[in-house]
Image (tube, rainbow, N blue to C red):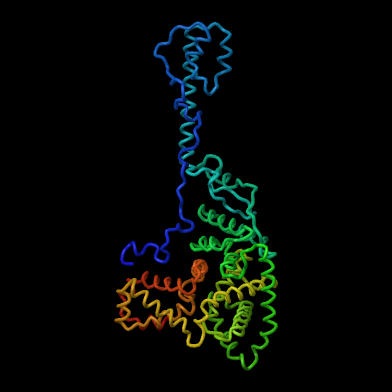
Amino acid sequence: MANDGGRKQFWKRSGSKVPGSIRHVYGAQHPPFDPLLHGTLKKPGSKPPTTPVKLKKVSTFQEFESNTSDAWDLGDDDDELLAMAAENLNTDVVMETANKVIQNHSRLQEQHKLQEEQLQEDKPVPFSELPSVVYGDNRLVKSVSESHASSSAESVRENSSMQRSQSFPHAPTDPLEGEVADHNTSATPALTEREAFRLDKFKQLLAGPNTNLDELRKLSWSGIPKQVRPITWKLLSGYLPANVDRREGTLQRKRKEYFAFIEQYYDSRNDESHQDTYRQIHIDIPRMNPESLRLQPKVTEIFERILFIWAIRHPASGYVQGINDLVTPFFVVFVCEYIEEEVENFDVSSLPEEVLQNIEADSYWCMSKLLDGIQDNYTFAQPGIQKKVKMLEELVSRIDEQVHRHLDQHEVKYLQFAFRWMNNLLMREVPLRCTIRLWDTYQSEPEGFSHFHLYVCAAFLVRWRKEILEERDFQKNVLSTS
């Protein structure tokens, strides 16, 4: 990171465009030619309109018409002049009428020119190419009004309310999903044009018969809209198949399988051989964030079951402190699929029992998929974490030698502060909403929770390098994070 070139595309060095990047729209400033708006342009074979300085004396309507034929393009004064055709024309009448028609023609032409300029300023992109905004009833409304933009609040409200009857195709993976999704969307604030565009792309990608997971990963790298995050996480984690027709059957089978584990194993938590495991889970759950969740008995009960079943089914590692934090993001995301407000302000026990069971089973399976990739973090002596901390040290020594040397000079070992970063995947270092956004990217990477996580940790050290280099007493800070 010594120069801008090294910093650019730090993790990915491919030349492909980042999903969601702005693309130029060509032709927006040059709409199709309209002869009514471009009356001054010459047509092949036509003579430019001229107004003679001195009109010759004419006595017939045919002569008058041939001299002023360019003035009738708009046809606004046809009736008046045709009525005059039956009369005998004198020079004064001809001059007065001709000047009136030419003036009207020029004024209308100028008005059309001004309207065209205003239209180009207000609508830089053709209306058909604009992204769509999804409202609570799942209908579409264009981000820019079909009519000319108005400065008044009333016209803005009228333009915003214009809706189209076309709907996004959507295949719910749960009987309640379609109904709840509509309810949730209506309570969300209005989307920006970019947010609406990204949501549109996600919905179109997810609605196909077979979701392209490579494209879904590319699109998810820069964040997943809240409305489609639950289904996207289930797909990216490998819990759900890409084929739409198989998803409902998979959900039913996996949820049934999870609760079969509950019936088979959960009563054994009181056995002497499992007492230590269950006791440690019971101690760790009250330490999790956010506080509003851990104080709810229903949430505690769900987390205890999830963690105990996972520990029983993975005897190579069993339960290890820190695994309890990894359930929270999945649980919160899947709860938000069914509620309007923030989960911190919501009583989870008010949800129907069937919904809670679905959330519990889905959280268990998605957490299991995550831990499958980093299980060596939690086996005996936690070799995975030891290895990752060493890799972080080597990475920082290459990208910011000054920070690395400063830590070494003050005898700060990376294991002292980075162990928890690897064990809890930064869950204790950043707010929950930031963790969820970070996991959007982690899940879009094939090895996001293992390898890419190292670069995020290194970015932390580089981001606060100034404060690190100014620090002389690290003992206090290291103890406060342990």
Position of 200 relative to 427 (above/below): above
In percent of width and height, residue 353 lies at 70, 73
Place residue 300 in its image quadrant: bottom right
Could you tell whether 102 is left or right of 468 in the image?
Answer: right
Q: Nearer the viewer, residue 227 or 92?
A: 227
Q: Nearer the viewer, residue 72 or 129?
A: 129
Position of 127 relative to 317 (above/below): above
Residue 482 seen: no
Q: From the image, which quarter does the C terminus lie in? A: bottom left
Q: Residue furthest bottom?
A: 272
Place residue 267 in its image quadrant: bottom right
Place residue 418 in its image quadrant: bottom left
Q: Residue at x 48, y 19 (%)?
A: 70
Q: From the image, which quarter does the N terminus lie in? A: bottom left
In percent of width and height, residue 342 lies at 57, 67
In percent of width and height, residue 295 lies at 58, 78
Q: Nearer the viewer, residue 389 or 359?
A: 389
Residue 86 seen: yes
Q: Residue at x 53, y 9 (%)?
A: 61
In percent of width and height, residue 389 lies at 41, 80
Q: Residue at x 59, y 56 (%)?
A: 204
Position of 29 relative to 413 (above/below): above
Counting labels gives: 0
Could you tell whether 360 is left or right of 16 in the image?
Answer: right
Position of 349 relative to 209 (above/below): below
